[in-house]
Amino acid sequence: MKINLKNGNSLEHFVATNDKGHKIELSGDGSAVGPMQSVLMAVAGCSTIDIVMILKKMKQPLEGIEVEVEAERREEIPRIFTKINLHYKISGDVNPDKVKRAMELSLEKYCSVSKMLEKTAEITGSYEVVA
């Protein structure tokens, strides 16, 4: 896996590109996603992809999924995350017990990002099935 990062509009605005040419913008000045925000986006994306795949294997009629992430960081430098909660909003005629199991499997076993972050942060998940 390779990533290239170079400055964009300013010396505090960056464009990161992967080896397939996909890009994201990052900044330290608020003009794009901050690096720590991108970590939260990564854990949300990783776990949500897992949940979708697990629910498909469980033959659940998933229609949509959204995740809201809230996190706390310590005050001292380095300002690492200490708590992260992912709240999943699942739509479709799905079995809530299967949604719970899919979420647990992702956060406790499959999501590489959450497994890395759990070394320093308490990671919790919650969910609701919405109409």
Image (cartoon, grey):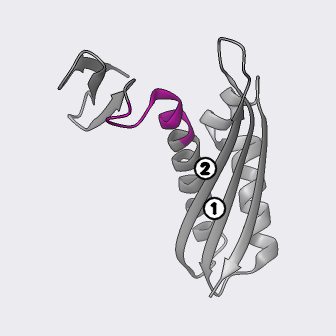
- In the rendering, which numbered label is found on residue 131? none
Tell me if residue 114 comes above or below residue 11 in the rendering: below
Query: Mark 1: which secondary structure?
Result: helix
Q: Confirm whether the magenta stretch covers residue 38.
A: yes
Tell me if residue 42 comes above or below residue 125 in the rendering: above
| Residue ID at (19%, 24%) | 8
In the rendered image, residue 105, in percent from the top left (x then y), is placed at 75, 51
The residue closer to the viewer here, 71 or 128, is 71
Specify which label sits upstream in the sequence, 2 or 1.
2
| Residue ID at (77%, 60%) | 126
**Which contiguous range is marked in magenta?**
30-40
Q: Confirm whether the magenta stretch covers residue 33.
A: yes
Which residue is denoted by mark 1 in the rendering? 54
Left or right of 80? Residue 98 is right
Tell me if residue 103 comes above or below residue 20 in the rendering: below
Label 1 neighbour load within 10 Å: few <14, some 14-19, many 20+ = some
In the rendered image, residue 31, in percent from the top left (x then y), is placed at 31, 35
Query: Mark 2: which secondary structure?
Result: helix
In the rendered image, residue 90, in percent from the top left (x then y), is placed at 62, 73
| Residue ID at (74%, 23%) | 74
- Residue 75 falls in which quadrant of the image? top right
Amino acid type, residue under disc 2 in the picture: Ser
Circles 2 and 1: CB distance less than 8 Å?
Answer: no
- In the rendering, which numbered label is found on residue 47? 2
Split into 4 quadrants, where in the image is the C terminus? bottom right
Label 2 neighbour load within 10 Å: few <14, some 14-19, many 20+ = many
Split into 4 quadrants, where in the image is the N terminus? top left
